[in-house]
């Protein structure tokens, strides 16, 4: 997430914001049950989206396919239906100034959900 951190700082976000978004993505991937390869792909695509300032196209599709819980958190944080996110992504409306606060707003929910998950052996 070093690239994400640099991109987020360019948009005026603090180091604390970077940590919160990183934790939200990481926790969402764990809840989603993403494999290591899937998680790596989502992180790469999300970092690229932040560098561009907008989550759309291939980046959105990667997050949507492998990070189901991240997409649901994003929808909840933005106050929209999940089904509307694809159209928003296609229209270039999932900009960093909307995505970052939306994910940060859902961090507590993601933490609670992860803490409530049964431990696996």
Image (spheres, helix red, strand yellow):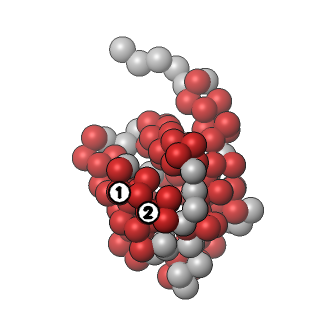
Q: Residue furthest right?
A: 79
Q: Quadrant of residue 116?
A: top right
Judge the density around disc 2: few (<14), some (14-19), many (≥20) Cα neighbours within 10 Å.
many
Q: Secondary structure at mark 1?
A: helix
Q: In this figure, which residue is indicated by the disc labeled 1?
A: 3
Q: In this figure, which residue is indicated by the disc labeled 2?
A: 7
Q: Identify the residue at horizontal 37%, vertical 49% (top origin).
A: 1
Q: Is residue 38 at all visible to an observer of this figure?
A: no
**Residue 34 versus residue 4 in the image, above or below:** above
Q: Secondary structure at mark 2?
A: helix
Dots 1 and 2: beta carbons under 8 Å? yes
**Residue 13 versus residue 89 in the image, above or below:** above
Q: Identify the residue at horizontal 61%, vertical 67% (top origin).
A: 97
Judge the density around disc 1: few (<14), some (14-19), many (≥20) Cα neighbours within 10 Å.
some
- 85 sits left or right of 55 in the view: right
Q: Residue furthest bottom?
A: 91
Q: Is residue 96 at all visible to an observer of this figure?
A: yes
Q: Position of residue 65 (x, y in %)?
A: 40, 59
**Residue 92 versus residue 14 in the image, above or below:** below
- 60 sits left or right of 94 in the view: left
- Report how far apart the C-alphas of labels 1 and 2 lie in the structure: 6 Å
Q: Identify the residue at horizontal 63%, vertical 49% (top origin).
A: 104
- 6 sits left or right of 13 in the view: left
Give whichever of 68, 57 is nearer the camera: 57
Q: Residue furthest top?
A: 121
Question: Looking at the figure, which quarter contains the C terminus?
Answer: top left
Q: Position of residue 54 (x, y in %)?
A: 49, 73
Q: Quadrant of residue 77?
A: bottom right
């Amino acid at each position: 997430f070093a690239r994400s951190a640099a991109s987020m700082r360019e948009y005026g976000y603090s180091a604390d914001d970077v940590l919160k978004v990183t934790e939200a993505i990481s926790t969402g991937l764990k809840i989603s049950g993403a494999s290591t390869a899937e998680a790596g792909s989502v992180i790469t695509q999300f970092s690229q989206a932040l560098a561009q300032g907008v989550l759309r196209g291939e980046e959105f599709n990667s997050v949507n396919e492998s990070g189901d819980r991240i997409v649901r958190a994003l929808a909840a944080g933005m106050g929209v239906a999940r089904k509307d996110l694809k159209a928003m992504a296609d229209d270039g409306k999932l900009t960093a100034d909307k995505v970052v606060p939306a994910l940060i707003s859902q961090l507590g929910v993601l933490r609670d959900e992860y803490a409530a998950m049964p431990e696996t052996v």
